[in-house]
Image: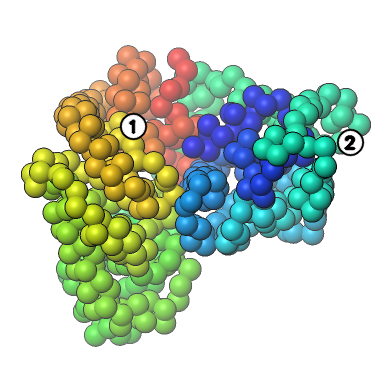
Amino acid sequence: MYVTTFQRYVRLGGRCASARIAQRRNLSGADAINALRPFYFAVHPDFFGQHPREREVNENSLKRLNGYLENLQKPGARYPKPANLTFYVRDTKERADSSDSLLASGFRSVTFTLQSKDVLSTVLDVLRSCSLSVEHMQDVLKAETGKSSTQQPGTAFYRPIKWDKTYYTFTGFRDPEQELEQARRVEPTLSLWLRNNEPEATKKQNASVPRREELRRLKRELIQKLGLLDIRWQRKWGFAHKCSQLQSLGRLFTQSPEALHILRGHTIVFTDQSGMNASGHVMLGTMDVHHQWTKLFERLLSYRSLFQQSDWLKERISHLLGGIQVIHIERMGPALPLEEHYSTLNTFHKRLLPQRLSLHPRSMQGLTMTLENDRSTPCLHEMGHFIIPTMCDTLQLQNFLQSQAQEARRRMQRRDKLEAEEEDIVSSCLQDLSLRSLSKEPSVSSNQMIPCCRRLMEEKSPQMQGLHLYISHFYSVMQDGDLCIPWNWKG
């Protein structure tokens, strides 16, 4: 959604946020986009192509912010729950406060909590939290305290403004359209980029060999000692970082082996916070200390109970909705805590209970659905699963499920076919190009991965031999030598 919002903003030609004022304190979607103009250009992922971690954080936070704003604009909707967001902010001259220190990457890390009850307050909170100017909002704020007597009820005042290029020359502010043009300048061809970057990738990869072997050893030993099903990472951290996390867990086991026995049969995921996720995996926060991990292990029995209650709610929802299965799709980015997942299931189940839906007990069997708090209308994903708002109208939900069931089955069949085709072509590409490994970013779909692999086999660049290739949306040489290329690379 962040791309749609951003592109829509660009098309508005730089209109001032104050030039369009809604009658209600809840600004319209266009007003909010206009008002957040400095923010979008400071955090938009398109400007973070060479910084995959920051790009990923901003992508996820933008989706949550846009969902929060969408909920506030939905008539009759309950106020959304407070949302904790983190953004990496590019340094611009439009900052209201220049006292913040920059990270080594050149970006500021900003974390804040959204809890405003209207769009205008939310927009102001976002801008101020990121130390961005709100001067362009002054007319909106004045209009809020005293509406113009000449304005007719229900009519929005509108005056489009497009800044001349001389404005940026005179003020020293950065021209956002010019910056966007530079960020999206013509990408190099794959062969040219490989010629320039393959030596660096090979050097880093060779240097990382000991770390890769050490990681495999540590992971294998800990899985065996603790009786784990698996050890995973929520983010694409470097091997040195992953090794230090496993070493830390190993030291805790040496110091307090009895505290870790309860982990037997679990999957551990190293992520940003400690707890249990919606899939029932134990999350270990990478910034937490041993004491906090130990406290988590002491609460693990309570988490198991909550996970069982979540499974029971899924079964009850499935029974009420004709056998459809409630699933949770894991993605890179912030993990969904089990408590939040349970609360969503419980709220949705309570909405269904008083209703007598006329769905045949097995009419939706074999189909799947996810629940989302940030949506206002149900939809059918291209991969065949339903995406249902937690506060969805039950009659609307029944009609939607019944009318789209056949299409959902068709899309699921197509998904299964695509995934099988992707698996085959990845295997062929791995062998034909003599790659060490070939993987992709979760946001790269099968529809994108399949033609990417076909073209790679046609190109058959010898410079890729023996390298680890990662398909994403941008070019980069990762810290351990993995080659990151966009799925739609230019030949």
Quarter-wise, where is residue 454 in the image? top left
Query: Total label count?
Result: 2
Instruction: Please tell me whether mark 2 sits on a helix, a strand or a loop.
Output: helix
Q: Position of residue 167 (x, y in %)?
A: 87, 29
Quarter-wise, where is residue 48 in the image? top right
Q: Residue at x 88, y 25 (%)?
A: 166
Q: Position of residue 402 (x, y in %)?
A: 20, 36
- Mark 2: amino acid: Thr
With 454 as the anchor, is 13 left or right in this view? right
Q: Name the disc covering residue 171, or none.
A: 2
Instruction: Please tell me whether mark 1 sits on a helix, a strand or a loop.
Output: loop
- Residue that lies at the very extreme toward the right in this rendered image: 170
- Residue that lies at the very extreme toward the left in this rendered image: 362
The relative height of residue 247 versus residue 330 in the rendered view (above or below) is below
Q: Nearer the viewer, residue 347 or 448?
A: 347
Q: Judge the density around disc 2: few (<14), some (14-19), many (≥20) Cα neighbours within 10 Å.
A: few
Q: Residue at x 42, y 39 (%)?
A: 482
Q: Residue at x 43, y 66 (%)?
A: 273
- Mark 1: amino acid: Ser
Quarter-wise, where is residue 129 in the image? bottom right
Which mark sits nearer the N-terminus, 1 or 2? 2
Viewer can see residue 182:
no
Residue under label 1, please give it.
445
